Image (cartoon, grey):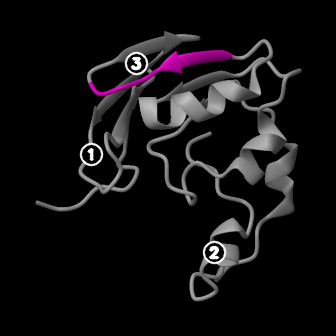
Amino acid sequence: MIDPYLSNSVEKINPNNYRRVAVDESFFNIKPDIMIFTHNHLDHYDPETVGHFITSDSKVTVLSPKSVWDEVRKIGGNNNYVLFNRHTSWTENGIKFTAVKAEHSDSAPIGVIIDDGEKKYYITGDTLYN
């Protein structure tokens, strides 16, 4: 799971940024093995959403750049909090995750390349075109 935003926390801060599409409640039934956060903005690292998936009782591998890592580790528990800055790779269950540079207003945002050995997926996070 990458950058889940399933609350209305952004709207609470800025009513003009309200959710245009209702959340599919079935997402809350997912039990992720790995969660990736690309940067520390509320619509990418949302503590209200994170609390549904990462708890002190869960066993989730969390891949995140330092800006999020400092926050998400406060949850504690048996989760594996991996500092996932640019140029870092992590392999789990035969799938390789690589953090790559993204351009955004956060201090060190990342994009992610996911390689399962057959296909590669590129998740941009939020990145600016330049």
Task: Tell whether position 36 is magenta.
Answer: no
Tag 2 and tag 3, C-beta contact below 8 Å: no
Q: Nearer the viewer, residue 118 or 42?
A: 42
Report whether 43 appears left or right of 80: left
Q: Give the residue displayed 64% in from the left and 83% down from the top.
A: 20
Residue 28 percent location from the top left of the image: 84, 49
Residue at numbered disc 1: 102
Residue at numbered disc 2: 13
Which one is in front in this view, the residue at disc 2 or the one at disc 3?
2
What element does badge 1 sit on? Answer: loop
Check disc 1 and give the amino acid type. Ala
Residue at numbered disc 3: 117
Which segment is the magenta one?
80-86
Residue 22 percent location from the top left of the image: 75, 76
Residue 59, placed above or below residue 124:
above
Nearest to N terminus: mark 1 or mark 2: 2
Crowd tier of the residue under label 2, counting other residues whose Cα lies within 10 Å: few below 14, some 14–19, many 20 or above:
few
Residue 78 percent location from the top left of the image: 78, 12
Check disc 3 and give the amino acid type. Gly
